[in-house]
Image (tube, rainbow, N blue to C red):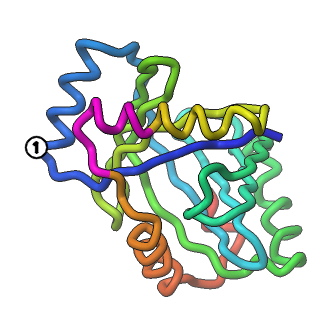
């Protein structure tokens, strides 16, 4: 089990471009991905991410709320061919409401942290700064480092309550999923 320490900023197009220029000069570019995420909120948080051009989907379980300094995260890869069967299992377990969103992401490594520039369907332009650790004792230190990096990038942290409202709005548009929506 790992812990994810993450802070987000909702930005304008000019802020997005400014941060991208800064990272292009000062960080290691990790690449660009286009993906579709399927987010389940009940009975617990679960995300299935399908990245264009990949043979596997990534299933992510996170425990904790958006307002926690760090959330436990468990990732598992599953082949696309097994995804339909997995969805049927999820439905039998009570995972019925789901929202999907498309994301265009550019990732960078900066001062040992991951910085992701996201264009997210419905949510807009979101920049995330994150750290991953296995040791609970490192969470406070890494949280400070993530916050300092946000300041270095000139970003104002998106308050958890606002992000929660944004996500709640997405979930209010939830629909019953079927196995065909994942292809």
Q: Position of residue 141 (x, y in %)?
A: 59, 32
Q: Nearer the viewer, residue 158 or 177?
A: 158
Task: Please tell me whether residue 144 is drawn above or below residue 169 in the rendered image.
Answer: above
Q: Residue at 70% across / 62% down in the picture?
A: 64
Task: Measuring from the top left, give residue 106's x and y in whole percent.
Answer: 38, 32
Q: Say which of 103 and 142 sits in front.
A: 142
* Up-down relation of residue 102 to residue 77 (above or below): below
- The quadrant in which residue 105 appears is top left
Q: For residue 133, which quarter of the picture?
A: top right
Residue at image coords 41%, 24%: 108
Q: In front: 128, or 88?
A: 128
For the point 75% across and 50% down, the residue is 72
- The part of the chain drawn in magenta is 147-156
Q: Is residue 108 magenta?
A: no
Secondary element type, mark 1: helix
Q: Is residue 155 magenta?
A: yes
Few, some or many C-alpha atoms within 10 Å of disc 1 (few <14, some 14-19, many ≥20)?
few
Give the quarter of the image for residue 34.
Answer: top left
The answer to whether residue 16 is left or right of residue 181 is left
**Residue found at x 46% / y 65%:** 160
Instruction: Name above or below for residue 38 compared with residue 165.
Output: above
Quadrant where the C terminus lies? bottom right
In this view, which residue lies farthest toward the left?
Answer: 14
Provide the major secondary structure of the magenta segment. helix
- Locate residue 73, reporting x and y percent: 73, 47
- The picture places residue 157, in percent across and down from the top left corner, at 35, 52
Q: Which residue is mark 1?
A: 14
């Amino acid at each position: 089990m790992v812990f994810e320490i993450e802070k987000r900023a909702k930005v304008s197009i000019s802020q997005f471009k400014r941060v991208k220029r800064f990272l292009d000069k000062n960080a290691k570019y990790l690449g660009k991905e286009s993906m579709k995420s399927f987010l389940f909120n009940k009975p617990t948080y679960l995300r299935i991410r399908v990245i264009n051009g990949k043979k596997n989907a990534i299933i992510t379980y996170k425990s904790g709320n958006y307002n926690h300094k760090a959330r436990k995260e468990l990732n598992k890869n599953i082949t696309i061919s097994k995804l339909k069967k997995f969805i049927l299992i999820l439905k039998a377990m009570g995972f019925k409401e789901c929202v999907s969103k498309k994301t265009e992401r550019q990732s960078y490594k900066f001062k040992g942290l991951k910085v992701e520039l996201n264009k997210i369907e419905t949510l807009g332009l979101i920049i995330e700064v994150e750290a991953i650790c296995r040791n609970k004792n490192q969470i406070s230190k890494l949280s400070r480092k993530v916050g300092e990096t946000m300041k270095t990038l000139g970003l104002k942290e998106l308050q958890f309550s606002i992000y929660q409202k944004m996500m709640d709005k997405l979930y209010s548009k939830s629909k019953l999923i079927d196995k065909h929506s994942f292809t």
